[in-house]
Image (tube, rainbow, N blue to C red):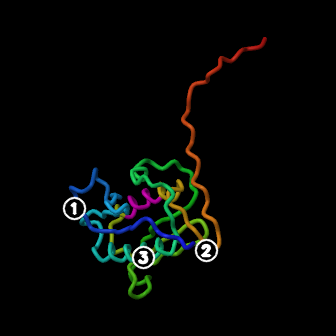
Amino acid sequence: MPYQPHKQVTYRIAEPHEFPDQRTVHISPLPSGGVEFLLRRGHARPELAREFTLQTAHLIVHGDWREYAADTAGLERPPLGLLLGVSRWEAVQPEDMPDGHLIYPTDYDGGSIVAVRADTHTDQLRHDTNDLLLRAVGDGLWNQHWPHTRPPAPPPRPAPLSAPTATLAVLL
């Protein structure tokens, strides 16, 4: 059976009051079950949000990237540092980008680097997005799915640290 995407992912420029803190990117759940990447006004050009929406829709529709954690609030937590995959934005000067592109994603086994035209966003937005991607992709909440391969199982949750339940005896 072909992959049926269950997440609609869109990007849009948002007003500061739509953010829970001072970050420049925030993921907000949609009533449809999808997610919306909110990019803080003043940190991204509107055409960047449109191009990311088009590119992301293509990747999700074709199943190249799949979500393994339905809890979008989990993306807001600090990364666990599992480094199961890599996805990043890298700023590229306009003259070094292919004509007509604001972004240029490159997938490789285990990750993705997205060349983003440097004059379309602030450094703070890029850093905040990379922090979010470190959690989403690095901790396995979203995984890459290459054709003719099975997606990996979601990573096990680390067990919380607890006090020992038995006393230690000292042998003399």
Q: CA distance from mark 1 to mark 3?
A: 23 Å
Marker disc for residue 27: none
| Residue range corresponding to the magenta coloring | 126-133
Q: Is residue 10 part of the magenta span, yes or no?
A: no
- Name the amino acid type tagged 1: Glu
Q: CA distance from mark 1 to mark 2?
A: 39 Å
In this rendering, position of residue 8 left or right of residue 138: left
Q: Circle 1 is placed at which residue position?
A: 15
Query: Cβ–Cβ below 8 Å for labels 1 and 3?
Result: no
Find residue 50 and report its horizontal and vertical position in percent: 33, 76
Mark before the other along the chain sequence, 2 or 3: 3
* Mark 3: secondary structure: helix
* Mark 2: secondary structure: loop
- Name the amino acid type tagged 3: Gln
Marker disc for residue 55: 3
Q: Circle 2 is placed at which residue position?
A: 147
Find residue 76 and report its horizontal and vertical position in percent: 39, 51
- Name the amino acid type tagged 2: Pro
